[in-house]
Image (tube, rainbow, N blue to C red):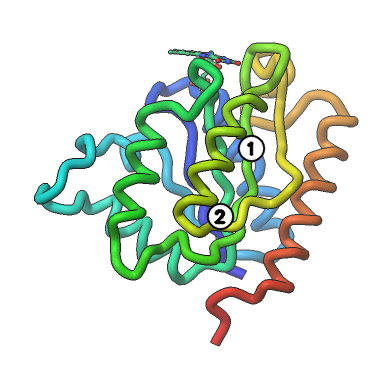
Amino acid sequence: MELVFLGGSLRQGSLNRRLMGYLAREVSGRGHSTHVFQGEDLRIPLYEDGLPVPDSVNAMAVALRASQGAMIVSPEYNAGIPGHLKNLLDWLSTQQPNPWTGLPVLLAAASPGAFGGSRGMLSWRASLANVGAWAAPASITVPRADVNLAEDGTPKEDRAIQEIRRALDAFLAGAERMGRGKP
Ligand SMILES: Cc1cc2nc3c(=O)[nH]c(=O)nc-3n(C[C@H](O)[C@H](O)[C@H](O)COP(=O)(O)O)c2cc1C
C-alpha cells in the first residue's frame, strides 16, 4: 500500500516528528511505501480564498489521493489541533477532488504531558469527519515523550512498542480491507 505521513511541529526537535519517523520505519518495514510530509512542508500561508495553492499542498493532495491511508502525528496545543496542522487540513479540504474523501486515517501523538496528546484527538476526529475521512477507532499516544522516546523516535518501553505495533497492524489491516484507490 501507499501510506502518507503528515505531522510534527515546525521546530527541529519535534517529539512528534521523531515518533512519526519511527512509525514510518515500522510501516516501510512491513513492505509498504511511505510518503512523509513534515517540517518545512508544513510551513504554508494561512488559508485565504484566492491565494495560489502552495506547492506542498499540491504535493500532499496528490499523495493523499493516490494513497490507501494516512497517519497524522500531531502535537496537542491547548487540548486541540495546533494551528499549522489545522491550516494544512483546511487547505487540503479546498482542493478538488477532496483528497480526504474516504481516506482511512490513524491518529498518533506524543507529548511531554501525562495524557500523551489524546485530548487533541477529539478535535482531529471532529474535523476529519467533517472532511469525509475515516479516522480509525484506535490511536497511538506517547505520554512523557521527552523521556519515553529515544533520539530516533523509538519508544524506550517494550510495552509501548507492543501497543504501537498492535495499533499499526490493526490500522493497516483495516486500510487494506477498505482497498481505497486500488486499480
Ligand atoms: C501553545 C502550546 C500549547 C500546548 N498545549 C498542550 C496541551 O494542551 N497538552 C499537552 O499535552 N501539551 C501541550 N503543549 C506542550 C506540547 O505537547 C509540547 O510542546 C510538545 O513537545 C509539542 O510537540 P513537538 O515536540 O512535536 O513540537 C503545548 C505547547 C504549546 C506551545
Could you tell whether 7 is left or right of 149 in the image? left
Looking at the image, which is closer to me, 172 or 123? 123
- Asked whether mark 1 and ligand 1 are closer than 8 Å, the reply comes as no
Q: Give whichever of discs 2 and 1 has the lower sequence position.
A: 2
Q: Is mark 2 on a helix, strand or loop?
A: strand
Question: Where is residue 167 shown, x and y percent of the image?
Answer: 78, 47
Q: What's the amino acid at mark 2?
A: Ala
Work out how far the residue at label 2 is from the one at label 1, CA to CA, in angstroms: 11 Å
Question: Where is residue 109 shown, x and y percent of the image?
Answer: 62, 31
Identify whether 64 is placed above or below 19: below
Tag 2 residue:
70
Could you tell whether 95 is left or right of 157 in the image? left
Residues packed near mark 2 inside 10 Å, few (<14), some (14 to 19) or many (20 plus): many
Is the C terminus in the top left, top right, bottom left or bottom right quadrant?
Answer: bottom right
| Total numbered badges shown on the rendered structure | 2
Q: What's the amino acid at mark 1?
A: Ala
Residues packed near mark 1 inside 10 Å, few (<14), some (14 to 19) or many (20 plus): many
Question: Where is residue 172 shown, x and y percent of the image?
Answer: 72, 61
- Identified at 53% across, 26% down, the residue is 75
Identify whether 144 is placed above or below 103: above
Tag 1 residue:
108
Could you tell whether 107 is left or right of 35 in the image? right
